[in-house]
Amino acid sequence: MLANLLEGLFNGISIGAVLLLAALGLAIVFGLMGVINMAHGELIMLGAYTTFVVQNVFKGLGSPWSDFYILFALIAAFIVTALVGVLLERTVIRFLYGRPLETLLATWGVSLILQQFIRSVSGQFVIGVGLFCALFFGAIAIISRRADYERIQAWAMAILLPLSAAIAFFSSKIAGDAFKLAVTKPWFGTQGVDVTAPKWLRGGLSLGTSTLPYTRLFIIALTIVCLLGIYWFLNKTVWGLRIRSVTQNRGMSACLGIPTQKVDAITFAIGSGLAGVAGVAVALLGSVSSNTGQAYIVDTFMVVVIGGVGKLVGSIMAAGAIGILSYVIGSNAFGPLFSGSPFMTSVVEFFATASMAKVVVFALIVVFLQFRPAGLFPQKGRTVEA
Amino acid sequence: MTRPFKRRDFLLMGSAVAGSLLIKSCGGTSDSTSSPSASTSASPVAAGDGIKVGILHSLSGTMAISEKSVVDAEEMAIEEINAAGGVLGKQIVAVKEDGNSDWPTFAEKAKKLIDQDKVVTVFGCWTSASRKAVLPVFESKNHMLWYPVQYEGQECSKNVFYTGAAPNQQIEPSVDWLLEKYKGKPFFLIGSDYVFPRTANTIIKAQLAAKGGKVVGEDYIPLGGTEVTAIISKIKTAMPNGGVIYNSLNGDSNVAFFKQLQGAGLGPDKYPSMSVSIAEEEVKAIGVEYLKGHFAAWNYFQTVTTPASVKFVEAFKKKYGAERVVNDPMECAYNAVYLWKQSVEKAKTADDLDKVRAAALGQTFEAPQGKITMENSHHLSKFVRIGEVGEDGLFKIAYESKAAVKPLPWNQFVKDTKGFGCDWSDPKKGGKYKIS
């Protein structure tokens, strides 16, 4: 019985760890900055695809390296998604601060773009879009240095836009015709790609009758490291202090000379980078395909909302609770308790499937939010009302 | 902070719109350079007197993973036929529509293909849900759909030709084979939570009950769900000494399931699994490492050695790249195009659908899987195969039926449909009649 209990606890925690890792980035972006980032799932997906690319690069390097690709994948995924996050923040989200509805729609659009990007990116695609961006924005940059830029701006745009679009379109078409498959073939395609855990992460640790999968242990460890890292960053570094002050009172922080724009970009980069790290973990457990992110976006928001927006400790508790709850219901862990009554057994068994467990967990969450609308650990203080 | 809509904003948005159009057109060209539809419709002659057919699959959304490659196979078949002179002396022009993994969209696009594009037939759909969504459209317009995927049966429409396997050509033989190979072992059924796995598992349970097998558990994961820890511990509790897992999961859940099954230490030696939705493409996406030694049941594997299969694989790799693989639904889709072509040639018309339908019955085709026949039930006689995943990610064929198996669309293990058959050659019998 004790062994079962421990195994149940471990499994619950391991489900929670994945949820928490996926939600950590969002807890920062949504919790601290108040940005509803619907593209968070797609950042996780980009992290997973980065893992795939790193895996293939290291496969080419041979034996000692290929066993440890996962560690490099963590770093690479963090960097790639952080860069994408900064790009997203600088080009889209920064114009929408304080307008949650528009942010929601815009980031939802971005998530669709990222999904389709992964499906259709190919050499030809990169040539076309890259050339367009280089020509158009390059030309704008050159022209904008002229003194009479304001005057000729409209004309310049009207000429440059179709011109660079046409050049990009035709050169990508020519490249496609000339090199055929080599350029037109999608890099990843619509079909998922395989990420195989390195040898030392396959299988599990046997403890009596139960087995603790190494990947789960790895993810739990990774989650703890990320949590400690964030805690340290937010509480012990200068930029962490600035982030917290901007979160509490943006206007006052700006008055005191804190570069709020830079703080926004850094916060968003870290949140996105954490999504990338979660992507590596997710790649070890599940599928890597263009819709990987979709599977996590609802769960991550759930964790952040239940935990209480803006509180990391809330997210930790919420992820743990949801994980243990869905495991206990889904695996029928309490089944033996009701073995006395056939009626109760059938009731419990009805709910003890993965789909029904999800329904029950959601129902419980709805009930919970009726009583605690601000989550487990609500924000306190005067800023909340503002 | 509102401000008037200035010229600068207009230009900014305009450039965004133009940019996205460019992205779209680039994405489009990458598809159409290889598709016959674009190359033929570009020349006015072909567009004028070509025969228009519709291709209706999900090119985006969760099902795009599987359906895109089926489109590839259909386009290859059309291209081959066109290169060999077309049908009735005319080139086939494919009109491609995206069902977006969304069932109402499928119905809408089916209407569009029939009413606006005036196609003479449609090749399309993958999930049973999408087929059920378009069925009323095809029936009300008395049109024609070729459906290329194995499915749960219990349907027999006059307006659909089913080129995938019926349950008695995939699920039932594989259960028999498992009962034989793993005598006395318990069964655990898992599946995605929608119509195909639920019906499939009903059939399996009835069959096992009739033949003395034992089912110790049954569980479903929401479509696309990846959290399988609870299911794996249920399997362990229900079958502590090993047993057979019958797997009808679809899509992404499979990846999570097999990765975590191995992590939990349940290997194919003690816990062999039989899958009905995992083919060569899925093996590639899941990773061979996790699937080695597990089984799958299909009508066709890439490793089948018939001359038609060798030719099919070679042509496909030449067209789409050497690392691509072919699978059963792709083969079924490829066959569908050829069977339609033969029916049209026999009927001597592509537009009179009743004549084409009548001509389709009894058509035979040397398919990659072997010689297939279109039966009066609008289903095919097909070969049944079971494969074991090998080191190279392809299937070692473990079982092969000696002759083509006749289709039984109405399941004989399920009480409601026991004793029913389907025969469209006889107007009195139709889609569901009592076999006396």
Image (cartoon, rainbow, N blue to C red):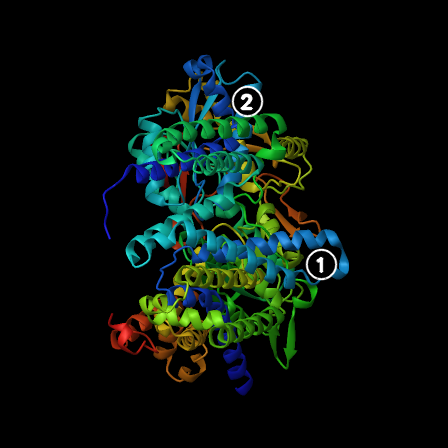
Q: Is residue A316 left or right of residue A385?
A: right
Q: Is residue B141 above or below residue B350?
A: below
* Residue sitting nearer the eye, B121 or B158: B121
Q: Is residue A373 visible?
A: no
Looking at the image, the residue that sits furthest to the right is A63
Percent coordinates x, y for residue B301 in the rendering: 62, 43
The x and y percentages for residue B322 are: 66, 37
**Residue B81: assigned label:** 2
Residue A81 in percent (x, y) is at 52, 56
Which chain is mark 1 on?
A: A
Count neighbours of disc 2 (C-alpha within 10 A) and say few if under 14, some if 14 to 19, many if 20 or more.
Answer: some
| Figure check: B210 above or below A145 | below
Residue located 41% across and 31% down the image: A161
Q: Kindly state the secondary structure of the residue where label 2 is placed.
A: helix
Q: Is residue A78 visible?
A: yes
- Looking at the image, the residue that sits furthest to the bottom is A2
Question: Which residue is rendered at x = 58% and y = 54% of the image?
Answer: A50
Q: Nearer the viewer, residue A327 or B269?
A: A327
Residue bearing the label numbered 1: A66
Using the image, determine if residue A201 lies above or below residue B37: below
* Label 1 – label 2 distance at C-alpha: 46 Å
Q: Nearer the viewer, residue A288 or A349?
A: A288
* Discs 1/2, front: 1
Q: Dot 1, how many residues are within 10 Å of its Cα: few (below 14), some (14-19), or many (20+)?
A: some
The residue lying at 23 percent from left, 46 percent from top is B3
* Subunit bearing disc 2: B
The image shows residue B428 at horizontal and vertical percentages of 33, 32
Mark 1 touching mark 2, by CB under 8 A? no
Name the secondary structure under disc 1. helix
Tell me which amino acid carries mark 1. Ser
